[in-house]
Amino acid sequence: MVILLTIAFFSTLFFFGWQIARWVLNENRIEHLIAFSGIFGLGLYVFFINIVGLFIPIQTVFYLVLVVFLLFASICFLGRRLRVFGDQRTLEWGISGRWRKILLGSTLFLTLSVGLISFNSHMDLAAARVATAVTMAEGNFPPMEIFNPTDPLYYHYAPDLFSAATYKITGMPIYAAYDLQRAILSGVLFLLGFFLIKLFFLDTATAFFASLSMMYAGTLVFFNGLNGIPALYHKFILGQEIYAPFKFVSDAIVGEYTTPVINSVITQHWGTMAFALMMAVVYIYFFLLYEENRGHHIPAFFAGGFLFALLALVSEPYFAVLGVVIFLFPFVFFLFKRDWTSAKKIFISSFILLSITLLAALFQGGLLRPALAQQLHLSSSKNAYNAVLRTSNQSNLNNNSNFFRVGTPWLLHDGKPIYDPLFLAEFTLLLVVLVPALVFLFKRRFQLALFLTGLLLLFFSVPLLIDSDFPDLAGQLGRFFLPIPLFGGLVIGLVLTTLYRRAQKSLLKGSLLLLAFVLIAQGLWTHSVWVAFGDPPGTWNPNAKFFAQADTLETKAYSWVKKNTTIKDLFLIIKDNYDAECGVSTVPNCLFILNTGRMAPTFMLTGIWGDTMANTSSPDMAALFSEVSKSCDSDILRKLNYSYVYVDGEWSKGMEAKCIKSNELNLMFQISEGEEFIRIYKIEEETHPLSSDSAEANTKQVHQVSQVVTDEL
């Protein structure tokens, strides 16, 4: 059933995206429609469920928007078949049969392999992304922070929302929903890079290899693999004991400052959607600048604006950079060309697209509106600050500290010189080749070259020029480097392929091939190693361990919780250590949340170490939780809005007895096997004493349990 529902779900999205692409882009080429059906189908679905979910319960919205999409697409399909919309161009292939097989075969391989690698990789539990998606599927929308449900969740949650919808509709495991999302959008990204180049260069081979370079272009980190030669020689030939002899494998994959696109789409849970949306917006923007597409400008403006706004819910930094470039592009174009007629057309397109985008982005939720309010001092609310960074250093709210300022470059943090050897090693080759490649592109496609140069300059310069008072935020600036191989690799692949096809001498051709191989070696190495051995090596479905197995105590308890409670019910779970389940960089009680979709907040992101509170946006509530973890005080439980108490063997010794003594508890569920047990109590209001026979029996049962746990003290 899961497989059938998955096929039905994605078929509906692609069917809708196909019809929208035919209308918005006036497109009839099959290979184009395949790519744009993916980005329009998935992207617009996320955009609309997010918008409609602000007014209608999200669990209803998941299905409602899908049904509307199916009806709309069916009407469009029947209208074309019946010629209601006039004569329609018939579907056709825009590339030869040979290149059709190569392009679609490569896309299919990329999609399947990325899906396989993702399935064999640990899901992104940092910052509670997957756990948040599970609560979204259960009705947590507009989303609240699961570790502190008094605060709205603003930080880019679009990939989590789509995974929540996939998980809810199809019934597949939540981690598989993320894997499938990455797989599909990686193939879509590859095709979008191909079609962006085809928009300017008709040669299919040039577009294909440019897109291939976009996916794999990397840095000189690949040469770290040479360190493995002496290590393996000493271990297997000389028989010496060598510590971590295969460390060279990972050293040739991971870069500190940047990494190939293939790395980012797998390791960043939001990376694939962010890159695909950026590429789609750039394509639509240039589509709008073509005079022959004038009859389709209105739908293209709205489709592009909605996808652009969605980018603000996926990656706020990339949204900001792309927005700045689109805003400045007509002015810089006029500065260079002095062509007022063309500049005016570009300005109008930029203005309309940005107007639709900003209106949608400000309305849809997310980080943009509170961040602007904070930066422009439009609100005194601390939520704007907390939306950007979770920090216990509340003193920063009352001084002259700044989130962003032009100052000490990020690369100088921790005493690193701005041009340290590692930074140079990672960027030198890419930049040395990229600069002349852009010069070459300027001579042939000025508008494309100018636009991509603006993107690359901003992405590269922000981490070098912008400083922050907040270390966590300063560390995030490194994400600006990630799109450099995306757009830089596209340009380099385009130019190298063009030069190779024009070269007459075999020496020049050989040199270009060698240069191209060195540039994509890191990405190819990464892809090959991860497909063959997994990431980390030797794993198969490593995420299954986070979900309770059949016929266990946890499974039965979790099932009761899902059937008998709602997303509004908060669970109190008290432990000595909240970090043991899923690691330090995740939400406390993550196993409970992942398996039930209910919140068990501690009001701190990474747990409690004695009296130290880390990464909280509400220190007062965190202090209350710290106190209730020791006393189980009934007044504090009411202030924190807890509804249930979930007790198992990991509870601190004696705390269950304290809770029973201090509160009016109603035992709702209990199960035990040997020394293992799980008991779930409902916290009753003391002003409404139990009076029914069943309640009296329950009280007696609680008293018996109380006697048992008291005897343990």
Image: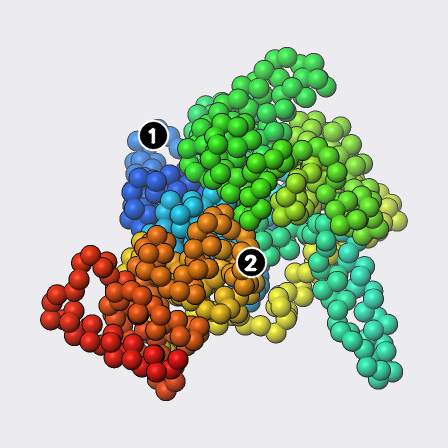
What number is the disc on residue 85?
1
Picture coordinates of residue 191, whole percent (x, y): 57, 46
Q: Nearer the viewer, residue 25 or 558?
A: 558
Q: Is residue 579 left or right of residue 456?
A: left
**Total number of numbered discs in the rendering:** 2
Picture coordinates of residue 162, whole percent (x, y): 43, 50
**Residue highlighted by disc 2:** 612
Helix or strand or loop: what does disc 1 sit on? loop
Q: In this view, does 19 lie above or below 344?
A: below
What number is the disc on residue 372?
none
Residue at 66% over, 39% down: 468
Q: Nearer the viewer, residue 78 or 258?
A: 258
User: Residue 108: in sight, yes or no?
Assistant: no
Picture coordinates of residue 513, whole percent (x, y): 80, 51
Q: Is residue 7 above or below residue 69?
A: below
Quadrant of image for the N terminus:
bottom left
Q: Nearer the viewer, residue 195 or 698?
A: 698
Helix or strand or loop: what does disc 2 sit on? strand
Query: How is this picture coloured?
Result: rainbow
Residue at 48% over, 62% down: 588
Q: In which quarter of the image is residue 245?
A: bottom right
Q: Is residue 529 left or right of residue 370?
A: right
Task: Name the amino acid type tagged 2.
Answer: Thr
* Viewer-side label of 2, 1: 2
Instruction: Compute the Cα span from label 2 to label 1.
Output: 66 Å
